[in-house]
Amino acid sequence: MPEQLAEVVDPANWTCPAPLRDQGVVVMGHGGGGALSAELMEQVFTPAYGNATLAGLADSAVLELGGARLAFSTDSYVVRPLFFPGGSLGDLAVNGTVNDLAMSGARPAYLSAAFVLEEGVELTVVERIARAMGAAAETAGVTIATGDTKVVESGHGDGVYVTTAGVGLVPDGVDIRPQRARPGDAVIVSGPIGLHGVAIMSVREGLEFGVEVASDTAPLADLVASMLAVTSDIHVLRDPTRGGLAASLNEIARASGTGVRLQERAVPVPDAVANACGFLGIDPLYVANEGRLVAFVPRSAADEVLAAMRDHPQGAGATLIGECVADHPGMVVAATGLGGTRVVDLPLGEQLPRIC
């Protein structure tokens, strides 16, 4: 190698754009819903809390209390910007927790709401978020029953953060969790993917993709109820938020010890999302959603469940995208349009942080 070239490409000066996995500090990727998030849970929180309920690592915990089966979930929302096409921080704070409860088959009932406000934020902004939460709760059929407010000094927050927790009742005979995926299950997604992440990206980065892309944020409990009316034997439900569809499918495959095979061309990706992802060099399978679910359903019931989903406004675009298989346990693969197969791995972090 010529001496001049050796100076230019000295490996000692190289840097990696992705966070390294042996970090001794928190990095943005720890909040992205990918491999770093999983490691944070496995290495820090699960050992610290140490209980069988948490070990299930589902969207919500299902608990026995006073003879009732309750689903319980909590989530924090730190989206930037606070308002975006199709929704706001307020919509996400309600719909996100409602959907986490629904992914256990529960009928959501009550939420709590805790605000962290930064000194100096305009009260009109706080009021707008609160009103959006009230409207979203009414649409979802839940009550915001309790809450809390804290204020931090200017420069020590980012305007408004919201944490919601929720409870709901799980019907008898319903057992929905990632460990129940079985070879032969049909894999169904409830509609077009990637809309939320692209909507946030377009506003935050000032990008235009020819048409306005609106977030898909919406409550999914009624859709789940329609599916359960067909069969109570739905094996798995997940709402593919951070890390997108790819992260959710990988989590299910690893929890159940099965494989997942997708038909890549069957995955519904809107043209605007495909164009945006092509422009930015990212995979739509890793882009966040806030009003979609992925379901693992016994093949014998799949056609009927799919029909019921398509009869519901939130499932009108429901599509069969693949199947659960015994091959390659713990892995997700996609059959490409060119006749090949590619591995769809768990993302390391989040391609676009702060999307929910």
Image: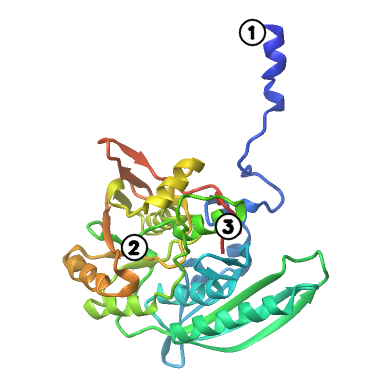
Callout 1: SS:
loop
Q: What amino acid type should be assigned to the residue bearing mark 3?
A: Val
Secondary structure state at the residue bearing disc 2: loop
On the image, the x and y values in percent for residue 117 come to 73, 74
Res 135 visible: yes
Number of numbered discs present? Answer: 3
As drawn, the residue found furthest toward the front would be 210
* Place of residue 141 in the rendered image (x, y in percent of width and height, measured from the top left): 44, 87
**Residue at 26% across, 77% down:** 232
**Disc 3/disc 2 C-alpha distance (Å):** 23 Å
Circle 2 is placed at which residue position? 191
Mark carried by residue 265: none
Residue 182 visible, this orientation: no
- Look at mark 1 in the image and give the residue it sits on: 1
Which of the image's four quarters has the N terminus? top right
Mark 3 or 2: in front is 3
Disc on the earlier residue, 3 or 2: 2
Distance CA(mark 3)–CA(mark 1): 46 Å
* Among numbered discs 3 and 1, the one appearing first in the sequence: 1
Residue identifier under label 3: 203
- Identify which amino acid the numbered label 1 is placed on: Met
- Establish if 254 lies above or below 108: above
Residue visible at 69% across and 53% down in the picture: 26
- The amino acid on which the numbered mark 2 sits, given as a three-letter code, is Gly
